[in-house]
Image: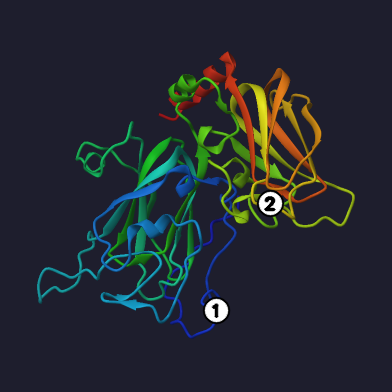
């Protein structure tokens, strides 16, 4: 793994033109993991101590931050992010904030899991970003209130220690804590603005919930499925194909560039655990002139298992949900969808239930991660 690039210091004042022209970013080694703080998974910013200039909910907006240099309100410049007021000291003799002064926001992850990396994005905050940030995590059962999360007996784990950040930059932090987290506390020292927060990791579902469901989508991101690899990610990430719900617009799908050869495209997945699959859905919602022409689904049991065709190559229609009942259930830990020759799908659903071995493996991992 390469070192995570870092950015510190002010960006230049906005000089006109494309506001992203001098934006500082990098290819972080963990961003192929799903965003556990995605609003589509049910994530939310449940509380903040201050949001005087810009609302805390902006932190989790899926689109990139926008900047309008002429957009002002009664409190000042309107920013697309979370921005607090300037902190002051206790007296005229000491007008500066103390070293401990900071602002915070509480984030409920949309899907609990192991965090592999965090991006604190200060896009368009050029002279009003925090001097440093820190991030803590906790695993809390149920649906706690902000007061319960902030109680004195709650033990928070440091994921990102207090670290200097830069303005108008994607500040990335690799995380190496092997625990399952449900909530984060994002701190900015001493004050300022953060545009977006992205929390990349692996979903770890609650085995008791999946057992109660019985039959569920065993490849769904919210249930612990993962998109492991894909032939092409030109337009959109493969993880889009296992997001909750139906796609509402084309950019919520998985779409490849146009092929000019005789090949085809594919995505491989890891299921929530070993499962017995009984039905398949392939949805091409909002893909009208660029849906895949045909698709097939294969599965394998174990990392070294042989790929077995569960659904033969089948014609797809644009903007349509296709449902297939298998003639016999198949047991698998991995799946792969192949599309021909290119294009895209919006969702793949694999309906089934965990095997005894799958239940045992999921329970063991859940207990191991606390």
Instruction: Check residue 287 in the rendering and tell me which mark sits there, or answer none.
Output: 2
Element on which disc 2 rests: loop
In the figure, 113 relative to 307: above or below?
A: below
In front: 290, or 143? 290
Residue 4 position by quadrant:
bottom right
**Color style of the picture:** rainbow
In front: 98, or 210? 210
Q: Residue at x 33, y 62 (%)?
A: 55
Measured from the top left, where is residue 357 in percent x and y? Answer: 58, 16
| Alpha-carbon span between mark 2 and mark 1 | 30 Å
In front: label 2 or label 1: 2
Q: Residues within 10 Å of mark 2 (few under 14, many from 20)?
A: many
Q: In the visual, does 77 lie left or right of 312?
A: left
Q: Which residue is mark 1?
A: 18
Instruction: Check residue 27 in the rendering and tell me which mark sits there, or answer none.
Output: none
Q: Residue at x 35, y 66 (%)?
A: 193
Measured from the top left, where is residue 194 in percent x and y? Answer: 38, 63
In the figure, 205 relative to 188: above or below?
A: above
In the figure, 252 relative to 24: above or below?
A: above
Q: Tell which residue pokes out farthest to the right in this image.
A: 262
Q: Earlier in the sequence, mark 2 or mark 1?
A: 1
Quarter of the image where the C terminus is located: top left
Q: Residue at x 20, y 40 (%)?
A: 151
Measured from the top left, where is residue 240 in percent x and y? Answer: 60, 47
In front: 210, or 105? 210
Element on which disc 1 rests: loop
Q: In the visual, does 145 lie left or right of 258?
A: left
In the figure, 306 relative to 152: above or below?
A: above
In front: 139, or 281? 281
Measured from the top left, where is residue 363 in percent x and y? Answer: 48, 21
Q: In the visual, does 105 lie left or right of 296?
A: left
């Amino acid at each position: 793994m390469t070192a995570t690039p870092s950015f510190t210091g002010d960006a230049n004042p906005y000089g006109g033109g494309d506001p992203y022209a001098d934006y500082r970013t990098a290819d972080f080694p963990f961003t192929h993991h799903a965003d556990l703080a995605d609003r589509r998974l049910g994530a939310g910013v449940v509380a903040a101590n201050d949001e005087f200039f810009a609302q805390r909910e902006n932190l989790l907006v899926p689109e990139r931050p926008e900047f309008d240099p002429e957009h002002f309100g009664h409190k000042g410049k309107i920013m697309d992010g979370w921005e607090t007021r300037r902190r002051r000291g206790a007296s005229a003799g000491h007008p500066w904030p103390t070293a401990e002064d900071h602002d915070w926001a509480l984030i409920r992850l949309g899907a609990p899991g192991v965090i592999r990396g965090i991006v604190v994005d200060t896009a368009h905050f050029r002279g009003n970003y925090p001097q440093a940030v820190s991030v803590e995590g906790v695993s809390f059962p149920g649906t706690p209130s902000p007061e319960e999360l902030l109680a004195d007996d709650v033990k928070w784990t440091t994921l990102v220690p207090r670290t200097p950040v830069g303005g108008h930059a994607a500040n990335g932090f690799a995380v190496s804590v092997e625990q399952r987290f449900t909530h984060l506390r994002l701190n900015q020292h001493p004050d300022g603005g953060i545009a977006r927060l992205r929390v990349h990791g692996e979903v770890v579902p609650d085995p008791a919930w999946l057992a109660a469901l019985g039959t569920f989508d065993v490849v769904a991101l919210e249930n612990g499925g993962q998109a492991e690899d894909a032939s092409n990610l030109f337009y959109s990430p493969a993880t889009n194909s296992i997001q909750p719900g139906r796609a509402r617009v084309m950019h919520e799908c998985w779409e490849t560039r146009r092929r000019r050869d005789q090949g085809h495209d594919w995505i491989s997945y890891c299921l929530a655990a070993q499962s017995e699959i009984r039905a398949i859905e392939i949805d091409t919602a909002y893909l009208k002139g660029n849906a895949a022409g045909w698709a097939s689904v294969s599965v394998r049991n174990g990392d070294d298992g042989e790929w077995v065709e569960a659904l033969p190559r089948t014609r797809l229609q644009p903007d349509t949900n296709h449902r297939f009942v298998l003639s016999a259930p198949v047991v698998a830990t991995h799946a792969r969808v192949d599309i021909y020759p290119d294009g895209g799908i919006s969702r793949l659903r694999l309906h089934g239930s965990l095997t005894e071995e799958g239940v045992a493996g999921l329970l063991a991992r859940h207990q191991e991660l606390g």
